[in-house]
Amino acid sequence: MSSRGRPRSFSREQALKNAMHLFWDRGYDNTSLADLTRAMGLNPPSLYAAFGSKAQLFIEAVDFYGRTDGAGIWDYIETAPTAKEAVRQLLTRTAENFTRSGEPRGCMVVLSAPQMAGGDADVCDALKARRLEKQLALEHRFKRAVAEGELPPEVDCSGLAAYVASLQHGMSIEARDGAARDTLMAIGACAIAGWDAMIAASGRATATVPAASASISPSA
């Protein structure tokens, strides 16, 4: 009698690693069930028994990426002596991580996202939550820098965090398009070189928000 269970040699971690690389390389939408079963060495019933669904498998693969290939990029956000150094470390490690040989280039969380229109809502929400978590970590670090006197009190911590996160996402796309590590390093270096101007601009933008809001209000 044939068994519908998992193969005796089944390694959940190895299967998950294979799925992670496939999603990372091709994206969620372009990875079929046939692709997954072939890469993971599982038949469809075994895959569903082990992981529940393609969406659940993908979310688990994203979290596996965060613990393995994507690890280390954000490690110094809280421990760096200054917010500027935290961002410098983040962008440097981003450039190094996104251009490692033998791995798909760029960030899995950014590049494997499904199409929003008609996409799986659970998958889209899960990725959005993970991206927001990193952005909030930056915002928290900048608020700490304000409290410690490193950054001026008028700086827009939320906007600054969104800018740095967007810059990192752009580096991911550059990496996938084939940009060399030196190019990504230069992007990070440019951001750090303009740190003081960026902080000053953030403070000015915050100060002008009420006036800007008033100028677009409909007249009575």
Image (spheres, rainbow, N blue to C red):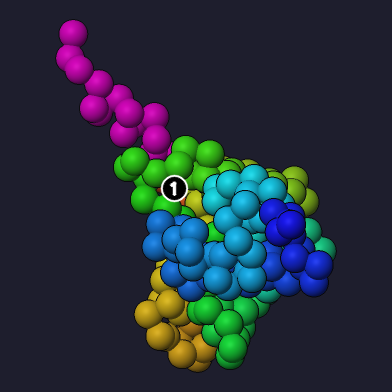
Question: Callout 1: 10 Å neighbours few (<14), some, many (20+)?
Answer: some
Viewer can see residue 185: no
Q: Position of residue 115 (x, y in %)?
A: 36, 50
Could you tell me what secondary structure mostly forms the magenta stretch?
A: helix
Q: Which residue is mark 1?
A: 204
Q: Is residue 81 left or right of residue 189?
A: right
Q: Among all residues in the image, which is located at the extreme front?
A: 1
Q: Position of residue 69 (x, y in %)?
A: 68, 73
Q: Position of residue 64 (x, y in %)?
A: 70, 62
- Amino acid under label 1? Arg
Please, is residue 196 above or below residue 45 in the view? below
Residue lying at 44% horizontally and 69% vertically, measured from the top left: 26
- Quarter residue 138 falls in: bottom right
Q: Is residue 213 magenta?
A: yes
Residue lying at 45% horizontally and 79% vertically, measured from the top left: 175
Residue lying at 80% horizontally and 72% vertically, measured from the top left: 9
Q: Report the span colored magenta.
A: 206-220
- Locate the N terminus by quadrant: bottom right
Please, is residue 164 above or below residue 118 in the view? below
